[in-house]
Amino acid sequence: MPSNSPILAEDLLLLLFQPNAGLHSGTGSIAGEGTLYYVLAGAVLADLGLGGHVRTDTGRLGTVTVAAVADKPPSDPLLRESWEYVADKPRGVQTVLAATGPTLRAPLLDRLVERGDLRRGTRKTFGLFRTSVLEAGDSRRRDGLLADVRAVLVDGAEPTPRVAALAALLYGSGTLPQFDRDIPWTAPVIARAEELKNGNWGAGAAAEAVARTATATIVNSVIIAAAVPPRG
């Protein structure tokens, strides 16, 4: 089991896992597979922003760029790969998402399996063909993450910066309507998600102004890159 704490992209991928959405009873699938790599790469960049490892800026043509904060590499290997990609020069956020996103799904899933959050199994299709499936693990960590996001979006709880970023990325991925049973897809929830997407995290997050701005910029870039309208 990994000794380090889960990164934001792990939490996001775990939330996007839909436990009973697979072809077989008790198996699941990942929501938003079509644009998943943009969203996971955005979560990595948001994590780097929250940790003060990168900063965002606006280029001459109005494009958003991301640059590494010198001499402040993250310790996590997956985060460090993205940090190193922007360490030599600032790059457009869209470029970073496209370059770093496609390789993230597999190692992130491996981590979730190693932690016991998910399990890999096999099932027979049509009684003949064995296929690989994903199943919920025993950790129940997904339940806790979902409860944290629901408290912020539905109950109006003030989020930690991490939960604010997680909720904003979930909304920005375009998959939030699929959580309607747990997080009602209502006008107040959409309005709250819009606030988080735009970096309005609440008075308690005032000290996180730089990270908040960077995260909001990254989340909005994810929405543009994935071409997913945030409203359902």
Image (tube, rainbow, N blue to C red):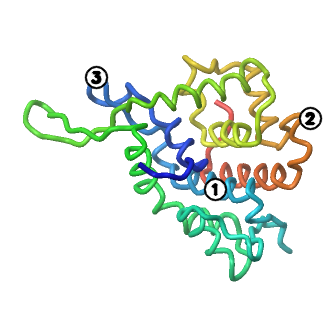
Q: Earlier in the sequence, mark 2 or mark 3?
A: 3
Q: Is residue 35 above or below residue 189?
A: below
In x, y percent, where is residue 179? 55, 25
Which residue is depicted at the point 60% across and 62% down? 97
Q: Amino acid at mark 3?
A: Ser
Report which residue position mark 2 lands on. 203
In x, y percent, where is residue 85? 62, 74
Disc 1 secondary structure class: helix
Mark 2 Cα within 10 Å, few/some/many (few <14, many 20+)? few
Disc 3 secondary structure class: loop
Q: Is residue 32 above or below residue 110?
A: above
Drawn side of residue 227 relative to residue 14, left or right: right
Quadrant of the rendering where the C terminus is positioned: top right
- Identify which residue, 59 or 53, lies in the foreground: 53
**What's the mark number on residue 225?**
1
In x, y percent, where is residue 83? 65, 69
Mark 1 Cα within 10 Å, few/some/many (few <14, many 20+)? some
Within the image, what quadrant is residue 107 found in?
A: bottom left
Q: Earlier in the sequence, mark 1 or mark 2?
A: 2
Q: CA distance from mark 1 to mark 3?
A: 34 Å
- Identify which residue, 132 or 119, lies in the foreground: 119
Drawn side of residue 93 relative to residue 21, left or right: right
In x, y percent, where is residue 154? 72, 19
Q: Is residue 148 above or below residue 129?
A: above
Report which residue position mark 3 lands on. 25
Which residue is depicted at the point 62% across and 75% down? 84
- Identify which residue, 96 or 11, lies in the foreground: 11
Name the residue furthest front.
3
Q: CA distance from mark 1 to mark 2?
A: 30 Å
